[in-house]
Image (cartoon, rainbow, N blue to C red):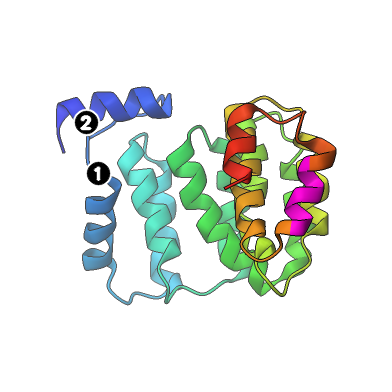
Amino acid sequence: GSRDRAAADKAAEDSPWEHLGVSPEDLGKAVGQVVGDADIDVLLPFAQRLWNEPVWEFKLAGLKALALGHVGASDALWAFVCDSVKQLDGPTLSGALAEVAAKCLVDTEARLDEVEAWAKSRNPWVRGTALAATLPWAAEGRDPERMLGWAADLAGDQAPAVQGAIGDWLRALADHDATRRNAFLAEHGETLSAEARREAEK
């Protein structure tokens, strides 16, 4: 890491944590080398210890370990996600946790009931993560209507975390259903931020 990167990352993330200035890409490589093919029984307590440390890279490393492809969904992993989501405070940790959450949601769709409450959280990063974690439902073969309902309720929420998540979701939906994306924008587009509209229209 570097001090310059640490300062830049801390400012960009608006983070209260200590920063070491390690790039997420390098951190991901290190996690893969250290973790190898360790199973969830080893990784989950390891990730929990990292998450509990007041160092941004440690928290991100724990999430990257749990996002590895060989780590399957489980009730214990979902419990970690639900506990950790309350502490989100920036875009990178939000995106990393959303990736872990998504595998749990795809595994057990009933967990969406809990995610719906995230969309009403006082924390804007949690509200945004509700959509980021459900991006698989923007893909072909899944019903997007529940999440589009959340997006409609949040359209007037001007928090950048929320507007960014809505724009990303609609862009992903348009990859295979531009008609439904266009219908959403016709009804709610004027309420979205200009940046979210631009992203959604890509």
Q: For numbered disc 1, what is the local secondary structure?
A: loop
State the residue at coordinates (66%, 50%): 170
The answer to whether 160 is drawn above or below residue 164 in the figure is above
Q: To which residue does mark 2 refer?
A: 5
Please state the horizontal and vertical placement of residue 147, each as a whole percent of the image.
76, 53
Q: Residues within 10 Å of mark 1 (few under 14, many from 20)?
A: some
Q: Residue at x 75, y 49 (%)?
A: 182
Can you give x and y, in whole percent of width and height, for residue 116 in the image? 78, 49
First in sequence: mark 2 vs mark 1: 2
Visible residue check, residue 9: yes
Q: Is residue 1 above or below residue 157?
A: below
* SS at badge 2: helix
The numbered mark at residue 117 is none
Tell me: residue 3, above or below residue 171: above
Q: Residues within 10 Å of mark 2 (few under 14, many from 20)?
A: some
Give the percent coordinates (x, y) of residue 105.
66, 65
Q: Residue at x 42, y 77 (%)?
A: 70
Asked whether 162 or 198 is in front, the reply is 198
The answer to whether residue 93 is magenta is no
Q: Could you say which is closer to the camera, residue 91 or residue 83?
A: 91
Residue at 40% x, 68% y: name it.
Answer: 68
**Residue 182 in magenta?**
yes
Q: Which residues are magenta?
A: 179-185
Quarter the N terminus occupies = top left
Mark 2 vs 1: CB contact within 8 A: yes
Type of amino acid under label 2: Arg
Left or right of residue 57: residue 158? right
Q: Which residue is mark 1?
A: 23
